[in-house]
Amino acid sequence: MNETRRDEARLSQEHLLGLEHYTAEDLELILQTATHFRAVLERPIKKVPTLRGITVVNLFFENSTRTRISFEMAEKRLSCDTVNFSAGSSSTQKGETLRDTAANIEAMKIDAVVMRHSCPGAPGFLARNLDSVILNAGDGAHEHPTQALLDMLSIRDRHPDFQGLRVTLCGDILHSRVALSNIYGLQRMGAVVGVCGPPTLIPRGIAELGVRVYHRIEEAIEESDVLNVLRIQLERHTAHHFPGLREYHERFGLTRARLEQHAPEGMTVMHPGPINRGVEISSDVADSEYSIILDQVTNGVAVRMAVLYLLLGAKTVEAS
Ligand code: CP
């Protein structure tokens, strides 16, 4: 990206804490920038000097495969210096608070923190207490903005116009951070968003966000162009929300038989991962022609490059 483009390309927000306050123009800018970086990632040399001199700390207090690796890869592709923090081997085990941990890391002269935490609002807390740019890599059951952005980029490859596109999130909406970010982002771009699952896994009051609520997977399939299937997050369940995983699969699992009987032409199936094969989705759907699950992962690197560039690019201009 050249200097002129860098001056023009500004988001309305200083941090990426969620998509709730991101405008349609912000989202369009991120998706277009990600498309540019996706082309860079197809080159024999996949690295650009765009964020040389910028230091990013990846502060992960929860497990992650896709988000942690793709953020680190995006940082390296942009020539950032990156440092990985893992809670299990850190001084948080000795009782150091989140605020002290973060302030000590910032004292080492960093520019940005990518944070995953089990506590909703933890990235917002850092944003209020540090000078660094904060990017939310998933906070409890609140938001996972880069997942929703990569989902949107992946959807647009198959369905170029969001206006009126019917996207339904199926599964454990109650414990999901992917759901809320997708609802905010997709609605802002003009999509019609639904949620589907047993009443015990749908948050009360979600219809007030303007989403359609389905309790029958067959009806959700019939009335959707895109199904984004979410994992049953047993590790977050503090009560029994359904009789068992087999019963869940029988009532709500996305199977080839259900798709062949109910899906409209051109249906797309997504899943943010990790997948519970045979629970929320059957293997023959996850690996089928309907599925764009691995395209989502590929797009994750380009989307994370885009948000890092848009939030931190100005710092390299200021420093030069
Ligand atoms: N989709 C997602 O956030 O995956 P990870 O937990 O592996 O990062």
Image: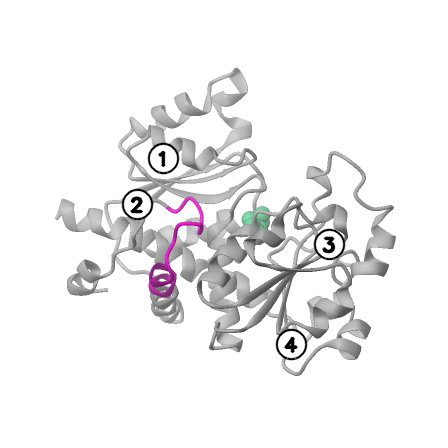
Say what secondary structure mark 1 lies in: helix
**Label 2 element class:** loop
Residue closer to the observer: 237 or 306 = 237
**Residue 10 sits above or below residue 139 on the image:** below
The kind of residue tagged 1 is Ala
Outermost residue toward the bottom?
A: 265
* Highlighted range, magenta: 16-30
Tell me if 174 is positioned left or right of 64 in this view: right
Q: Which residue is rendered at x = 28% and y = 60% of the image?
A: 48
The alpha-carbon separation of the residues under discs 4 and 2 comes to 36 Å
Q: How far apart are marks 3 and 4 (CA)?
A: 21 Å
Q: Where is residue 217 in the image (x, y as percent from the top left)?
A: 76, 64
Please indicate whether residue 254 sits to the left or right of residue 208 in the image.
right
Residue designated by label 3? 276
Precedes in sequence: disc 3 or disc 2: 2
Q: Which mark is residue 56?
A: none
Mark 3 → mark 2, Cα distance in angstroms = 36 Å
Figure quadrant of residue 265: bottom right
Residue 96 x/y as whole percent: 47, 18
Q: Does the magenta stretch include residue 241?
A: no
Judged from this view, the residue extending furthest toward the front is: 208
Tell me if mark 1 has few (under 14), some (14-19) or many (20+) residues whose alpha carbon lies within 10 angstroms of its own.
Answer: some
Q: Are marks 3 and 4 in contact (CB under 8 Å)?
A: no
Residue neighbourhood size for the residue with mark 3, other residues' Cα within 10 Å, grouped as few (<14), some (14–19), many (≥20): some
Per the image, the residue denoted by label 4 is 267
Residue 79, visible in the rendered structure: no
Q: Earlier in the sequence, mark 3 or mark 1?
A: 1
What's the distance in space between the residues labelled 1 and 4, CA to CA? 39 Å
Residue with the mark numbered 1 = 127
Q: In which quarter of the image is residue 93?
A: top right
